Image: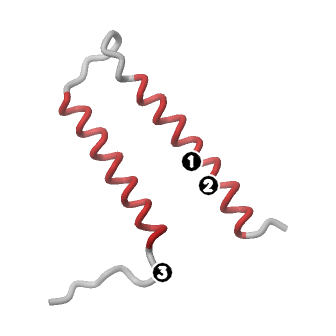
């Protein structure tokens, strides 16, 4: 029987390695001999990736409580 820990390790290693592979492929698009892009394009790509990475990290940092509610 697979434990929750074993399942987590198996799945997270696989998904993390897929993300790393895709980031390396994205890096291949930096070759100016093959592609034309602007600094604005690069900023938009990496701002979006950084935002999503922060959002994913926050899910691990959550204490399990409900989403934060607005208060005055």
Q: Residue furthest left?
A: 72
Q: Residue 12 — which label?
A: 2
Q: Secondary structure at mark 1?
A: helix
Q: Position of residue 11 (x, y in %)?
A: 65, 55
Alpha carbon distance from label 1 to label 2:
6 Å
Are the residues flagged by discs 1 and 3 in contact, CB closer than 8 Å? no
What residue lies at 26% left-to-right and 33% top-to-bottom? Answer: 42
First in sequence: mark 1 or mark 3? 1
In which image quadrant can residue 9 be found? Answer: bottom right
Is residue 17 placed above or below 40 in the rendered structure? Answer: below
Q: Residue furthest right?
A: 1
**Location of mark 1 (residue):** 16
**Location of mark 3 (residue):** 64
Query: Is disc 3 surrounded by few (<14), some (14 to 19) or many (20+) residues within 10 Å?
Result: few
Q: Position of residue 10 (x, y in %)?
A: 70, 55
Q: Residue furthest front?
A: 61
Are the residues flagged by discs 1 and 2 in contact, CB closer than 8 Å? yes
Alpha carbon distance from label 3 to label 2:
19 Å
What residue lies at 64% left-to-right and 50% top-to-bottom? Answer: 13
What residue lies at 14% left-to-right and 90% top-to-bottom? Answer: 72
């Amino acid at each position: 029987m697979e434990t929750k820990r074993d399942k987590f390790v198996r799945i997270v290693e696989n998904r993390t390695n897929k993300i790393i592979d895709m980031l390396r492929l994205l890096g291949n698009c930096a070759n100016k001999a093959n592609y034309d892009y602007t600094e604005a394009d690069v900023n938009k790509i990496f701002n979006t990736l950084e935002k999503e990475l922060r959002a994913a990290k926050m899910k691990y940092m959550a204490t399990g409580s409900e989403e934060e509610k607005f208060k005055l």
